[in-house]
Each structure stands twice: as C-alpha cells, then as structure tokens.
Image (tube, helix red, strand yellow):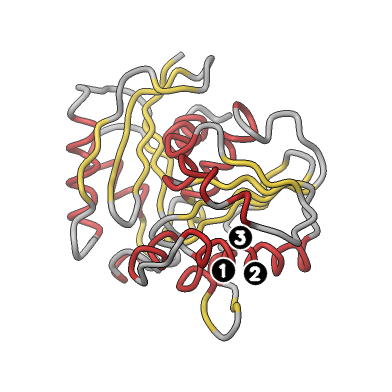
Amino acid sequence: MQIFGVDIGGSGIKGAPVDLDRGDLAQERHKVLTPHPATPKDVADCVAEVVGHFDWSGPVGITFPGVVTGGVTRTAANVDKGWIDHDARTLLGEKLGLPVTVLNDADAAGIAEMAFGAGRGRKGTVIMLTLGTGIGSAVFIDGQLVPNTELGHLELGGHEAEKHASTKAKEDEELSWHHWAHRVQKYLAHLEMLFTPELFIIGGGVSRKADKFLPLIEHVRAEMVPAELQNNAGIVGAAMAAAGK
C-alpha cells in the first residue's frame, strides 16, 4: 500500500510516495526550497509542486513545523506568522484537490521511528528529537504518542533550547562538533531530569553524522541512538497518519 507523504521544514519541503508495508520511500523523494517568507499561500504552492512532480492522486499526509490540532496550525516558530490559527488542512486540501492530513513534523517522524525504526518494540518513555532549523520533539509512553510537545522551546540557560542546540545554531555560530555536542548534552540532561526517558532517538538531517557527536555526549543515563529512517522519517510518518496508522 502506498500513500504520499510531505515534510514541510524550515529550509526545505520534500515528499514522496511511501510504501507503508516496508516503512520506506517507494520512489526517490523530490525536494524544493522553503519559500521566504514561508506564508501559507507560498508554502501551499511548494507542496503542490512536490506532489505534482509525481502526478499523485490519492490521500496525502503533510507535516508542519509547529503545533497542529484538528488540522489547524496553532504556532509558527520557524515559518511565517500567518500560519498561526490557520486552517491548514482546508488550505492544502483545496490546493491539491486531494484528501489531506496535517500533523506536527516531529510527531510524524516519531510515529515512523516507533513503527519502523529505532523505537520499534520499545516500551516506557521514548523521546524522539529532530535537530534541524529548530528542535522538534515527539514523546511516547508505552508506544502511545503525546502530541505537540514542542520541547525545543523549553528554556535552557536563559535561552530557548532550539536557539542554543539546534543544527542551525551550530551552523550559524560555526561551532565545532565538540562544542555543539556539549550544548546538546545540556539539553538532553534537562529533558532527562524532567521526563526520565529510557531512550532518546536523535533525528533530523544531522542524524546521518551521529558518529561525530553522539559519542561526545556524557552524563546522560538514557540510551541515545540515531534515527534509523534519518531525514525520511517525517515523510514516512506523514503517510502513516494519512493512512490512519
């Protein structure tokens, strides 16, 4: 069974048909740059370009980098503020002319990792983090998602955590892997103090380079592993949500 997934990020919008039996992309994904400003209309145009690239007709799952309730986007930390309280499901559904499901991007990535990746079969508290333009989070308790946690916005040392420990912070401040790993360590230790997870799954594009920073992180008791689906997790999870999985 195939369903289309789209992952809207702060820097890129990517999508592909997903094979839900394998939990993997059925075709090579297509990506376009996120427009700036990332207004609802301009982002919807880009989503339509990605979906149209495959001549897709059928349900589409779409992630959004913020809180989503009932298809309405409630926050917009890394996209245009016009998304706040916007009916994204109606906007994107009308633009595509297809049935659309919209959910938080990190929640989608977490759903995929729990079903097909590093969280498969894990019980207890699992926290998936997506390190990128910001920091997304997905919290699972015995396999059940606690939606829209947005733990990247916790205060850490007087700063919003994602402004301090995201991949964008590393790039903007030209931090070494060692320096950045120390920041990520402080963030993980803070989350561990609050939630006592058994497992941290580290996702986002930087998960491809997990060997450069995860071994540098100390004093965190929970197991830490890179996301197995890496940066495709959001696309797979979006498709799963559209399929009702």
Q: Secondary structure at mark 2?
A: helix
- Whether the residues at callouts 2 and 1 have beta carbons within 8 Å, the answer is yes
Please give the name of the residue rendered at 53% of the width and 44% of the height, measured from the top-left corner: 210
Q: What type is the residue that disc 3 sits on?
A: Thr
- Number of callouts in the render? 3
Which one is earlier in the sequence, the residue at label 3 or at label 2? 3
Give the left or right position of residue 212, taking residue 123 as reference. left
Please give the name of the residue rendered at 40% of the width and 68% of the height, measured from the top-left corner: 77
Q: CA distance from mark 3 to mark 2?
A: 19 Å
Q: Which residue is mark 3?
A: 149
Residue 106 screen position, x and y as percent: 52, 49
Q: Foreground residue, 192 or 235?
A: 192
Q: Nearer the viewer, mark 3 or mark 1?
A: 1
Q: Which residue is mark 2?
A: 186
Crowding at dot 3, Cα within 10 Å, few <14 / some 14-19 / many 20+, comes out as: some
Q: Foreground residue, 174 or 242?
A: 174
Please give the name of the residue rendered at 21% of the width and 49% of the height, measured from the top-left corner: 33
Give the left or right position of residue 207, taking residue 85 as reference. right
Toward which corner of the image does residue 225 lie, by quadrant?
A: top right
Q: Nearer the viewer, mark 3 or mark 2?
A: 2
Q: What type is the residue that disc 1 sits on?
A: Arg
Give the left or right position of residue 38, taking residue 3 as reference. left
Residue 163 screen position, x and y as percent: 45, 73
Q: CA distance from mark 3 to mark 1?
A: 20 Å
Q: CA distance from mark 2 to mark 1?
A: 5 Å
